[in-house]
Image (cartoon, grey):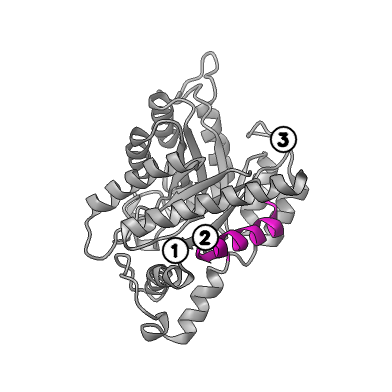
Amino acid sequence: MIPFSVLDLSPVPEGATLADALANSADLARHAEGWGYNRFWLAEHHNMAGIASAATAVVIGHVAAATRTMRVGAGGVMLPNHAPLIIAEQFGTLATLFPGRIDLGLGRAPGTDQQTARALRRGLSQADTFPDDVVELHGFLQPAEPGQPVRAVPGAGTRVPLWMLGSSLYGAQLAAHLGLPYAFASHFAPDALEEALSIYRANFRPGLGGMEKPYFMLAVNVFAADTDAEAVHLRTSQQQGFINLRSGHPGPLPRPVARIEDVADPRWIERVNEAQRVSAVGSLATVTDQLAALIDRYRPDEVMLTGQVHDHRARLRSFELAAQAMGALATREAAAKA
């Protein structure tokens, strides 16, 4: 079985609080650990009323403290918003508190609008130094050299694993050049997926990641329920949220509706469905078949599952069924090899 993991934005459902969202993330992580998930990643977004993971390192600590064995990390930290030394200290502290369990995925986008990016005090031009910042951050996490004038304390020697995140060819090229594992944001921006994957695999060379061969993680939206109809219903929350964000009206995660066609313009529905076409939606049997098709097509080394569901119990059930689907795929594979 290939490893499977969770990407969580710590969504804030309509009618709930930020405290509820953070408690729900920890609860999902505890359950996911028991269901066999490999990692639990959180993403950095700012000035968004529907996302509670802006202080990503803090929330990672919250989730890591609620679990025992599962890896916890960032999917990712938007490095242009931060000085590399600060991130090295934050994730070095996490690695010191939770040794062998912390991941650090890095993105180049600001994760917010331009006005908020300016409020973060780093400036929009920082993206131009992104490759150098990644190398500098990696250096701070390695054992300190004698006489090194600036050290990350904690951080030096923790060797927190770095991941490259991306939704374009740029991230694929940089991940290959630096020899890092690569996670593609196919759950919301799949257009360049096949070309990026081809570039990454063809151009990979050993480097900062200490790997001899490429390692690719595919992000997939999952909405699983006891019936296909219920899963389609649950998905309408994320569809509405995506439309609200892209149309300039972000907010808490909406409640699901009976029919997305009743609340959204057909052009927006088409747009969101196209952007989120790397998805598995339905009952256990349906989701199993859809995940099998995606895995067969893209041959990932790991699958990162995500899905914003308004009701927390339904979200738990969705990820539980998704884990069962991955287990069923492993059984199929074993039977085929027998």
Which circle's residue, 1 or 2, is located before the other in the chain?
Answer: 1
Whether residue 313 is situated above or below residue 85 in the rendered picture? below
Magenta stretch, residue numbers = 278-300
> Which residue is disc 1 drawn over?
226
Mark 3 is on which residue type?
Answer: Pro
Q: Nearer the viewer, residue 259 or 135?
A: 259
Which disc, if any, is residue 206?
3
Amino acid at dot 1: Asp
Quick check: 91 left or right of 328? Answer: left
Secondary structure under badge 1?
loop
Q: Is residue 161 above or below residue 322?
A: above
Give the label, 2 or 3, closer to the camera.
Answer: 2
- The residue drawn where x is 37% and y is 44% is 56
Q: In the structure shown, which secondary structural element does the residue marked by tag 3 occupy? A: loop
Q: Is residue 207 magenta?
A: no
Q: Earlier in the sequence, mark 2 or mark 3?
A: 3
Q: Amino acid at mark 2?
A: Leu
CA gap between label 1 and label 2 equals 7 Å
Q: Are marks 1 and 2 in contact (CB under 8 Å)?
A: yes
Badge 1 crowding class, 10 Å Cα cut-off, few under 14, some 14 to 19, many 20 or more, is: some
Q: CA distance from mark 1 to mark 3?
A: 44 Å
Residue 142 visible? The answer is yes
Please identify the quarter of the rendering in which residue 287 is found: bottom right
Q: Quadrant of the C terminus?
A: top right
Residue 264 in picture, x, y percent from top left: 39, 83
* Viewer-closest of 296 and 266: 296
Of the two numbered discs 1 and 3 on the same chain, state the one appearing first in sequence: 3
Mark 2 touches mark 3? (CB < 8 Å): no
* Image coords of residue 41 (percent x, y): 45, 45
Mark 2 — residue? 284
